[in-house]
Amino acid sequence: EAQVTQNPRYLITVTGKKLTVTCSQNMNHEYMSWYRQDPGLGLRQIYYSMNVEVTDKGDVPEGYKVSRKEKRNFPLILESPSPNQTSLYFCATGTGLADEQYFGPGTRLTVT
Amino acid sequence: EDQVTQSPEALRLQEGESSSLNCSYTVSGLRGLFWYRQDPGKGPEFLFTLYSAGEEKEKERLKATLTKKESFLHITAPKPEDSATYLCAVQARGIYNFNKFYFGSGTKLNVKP
């Protein structure tokens, strides 16, 4: 079954404690992306990757890091989380440049 | 600045009462406009892609249309299972931002039986 998986699904942490949210896809897609979703603001793109070792900033990259060492994985790293990073995070994948995206189930992060 | 605005924020319909959702956009050259459906607690699910003004796409009770400044998602004779949040997104054509996607904040549709 084609799917995008994210882990963990729920996370409560404290300010400054480094964390990683994993994203994995089994569709052999080249394009992967991270979004955060906040009430009234919609989905905002954090980072995206066109292929292995190729990543670039989206609209709200501050406070986040990503890496793409393998085609199937695209982890999101928060080196020093702050309360304003409390949000619902989605990983998405796509086949190409102008194409629909397939979203993971989401990770709800709370930073206290 | 690339921007997507959806209206209304929320829409309540009776079963069978047709209506339209609006997505207006400003983008430096449109590469594609996308509609997604999002159910509570889940990730967005792809519905349609539109590429040029005048294009239309249909799927069951949903029909998406595109002009140079906006897109409409028409819902004909909706059923309670159509209740969800509908998201619009655009992809710009520019050299430096064609891999970026800009989403609206969505329209929450509630269809009552």
Image (tube, helix red, strand yellow):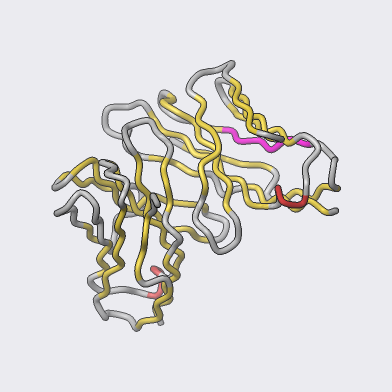
- Is B13 a magenta residue? no
Asked which quadrant contains residue B94, the reply is top left
Residue A49 in the image: above or below residue A100: below
Percent position of residue A66, x then y: 22, 58
Q: Is residue B48 visible?
A: yes
Q: Going by the image, does B75 lie left or right of A55?
A: right
Q: Which residue shows up at 29% across the image and 42% down it?
A: A29
Q: Which residue shows up at 24% across the image and 52% down it?
A: A72
Q: Main secondary structure of the magenta part?
A: strand
Q: Which residue shows up at 71% across the image and 35% down it?
A: B61
Percent position of residue A101, x then y: 41, 42
- Count how many numbered circles sit on residues in the image: 0
Residue lying at the far top in this picture: please name it: B54
Q: Which residue shows up at 60% across the image and 22% down it?
A: B56
Q: Going by the image, does B69 lie left or right of A77?
A: right
Q: Is residue B1 visible?
A: no
Percent position of residue A10, x then y: 43, 75
Residue A18 in the image: above or below residue A98: below
Residue bounds of the magenta highlight:
B19-24
Asked which quadrant contains residue A8, the reply is bottom left
Q: Nearer the viewer, residue A63 or B66?
A: B66
Asked which quadrant contains residue A74, the reply is bottom left
Percent position of residue B20, x then y: 73, 35
Q: Quadrant of the N terminus of chain B?
A: top left
